Amino acid sequence: MHLFEFHDLPNVPATIRLTLLDILAFCNGPVRDYYGDLCRTIVHEAETRGLRTVVELGAGTAPLTMHLAALPAARGLRLVACDLYPDIEHYRELTKRHPDQVQGIVEPVDFTLRHDWGPGVLLVLNATFHHIPPELRRQTLAALTQSSDRVLIFEPIQNNLVSMLLALTSFFPAIASPLWLTRPGILRRVLWCWLVPIAPLMFVWDALVSCLRQWSGERWQTELATIVSPDRKPQIATTIHSAVVRW
């Protein structure tokens, strides 16, 4: 099932789109520490494979790049953030803040198409793959496979009742997100979460639809088996509320 998500609609105002991304970062950062777990996995994967560059595809506001840049264990990694709808101001600020480590690409990058990222690159997608329409998913998997020797896909929710209940409760951290005073965009969040409180409702809808869009572990295995060569040995690990796919 591929119902619409507000985040995917091109006519959603940029301020609302950024507010939805802020809410996502709030839920997966201060509330859940999901990003911390992911960054430790990324660093371990890069070290194990001898990879020196991490590219965050479909990065949005680049939460993984930000967390990795602040992580001592990731200090030797080159970090690249990109998106089809890049947050240009934020990417430039990230690059300015970490000039020796971070590159924010301000031109749109469509990861459904093949890109030449060069050698030693780990491609990372977080809460992003489920946005790809079903008819483009195999093409996207093939493009990712051809673009790098190693790919990591994270999804913070699954298609089950527990994840859907979790999605419903996300309304409360969404309402509280303007209190995240260390995150830029406070006035924007106050507007769309408190004064005109549509962002929390939009976020809950998007979260529920995201659950319905998720592939099971068996589906991931079947799809990758038709695209990835046996020597890359896809690994799929799912829990009741998350998934990690690597090949």
Image (cartoon, helix red, strand yellow):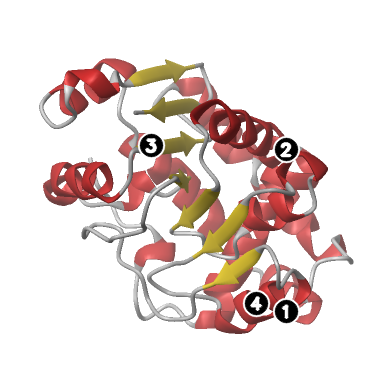
| Residue situated in front as seen by the camera: 45 or 246 | 45
Question: Quarter holding the N terminus?
Answer: top left
Q: Which residue is mark 1?
A: 96
- Which residue, given by chain and number where applicable, does mark 3 sit on? 150
The residue where tag 2 is placed is 36
Q: Amino acid at mark 4?
A: His
Instruction: Categorize mark 1 by other alpha carbons within 10 Å: few (<14), some (14-19), many (20+).
Output: some
Q: Residues within 10 Å of mark 4 (few under 14, many from 20)?
A: some
Neighbourhood count class around disc 2 (C-alpha, 10 Å): few under 14, some 14–19, many 20 upward: some
Q: Identify the residue at image location x=64%, y=44%.
A: 170
Name the secondary structure under disc 3. Answer: strand
Q: Are dots 1 and 3 in contact, CB under 8 Å? A: no
As measured in the structure, the alpha-carbon distance from the residue carrying label 1 to the one carrying label 3 is 28 Å
- Closer to the chain start, of discs 2 and 3, is 2
Query: Does label 4 or label 3 sit earlier along the sequence?
Result: 4
Say whether disc 1 or disc 2 marks the residue closer to the N-terminus.
Answer: 2
**Which structural element holds mark 1?**
helix
Instruction: Categorize mark 3 by other alpha carbons within 10 Å: few (<14), some (14-19), many (20+).
Output: many
The numbered mark, 4 or 2, whose residue comes first in the sequence reads 2
| Cβ–Cβ under 8 Å for marks 4 and 1 | no
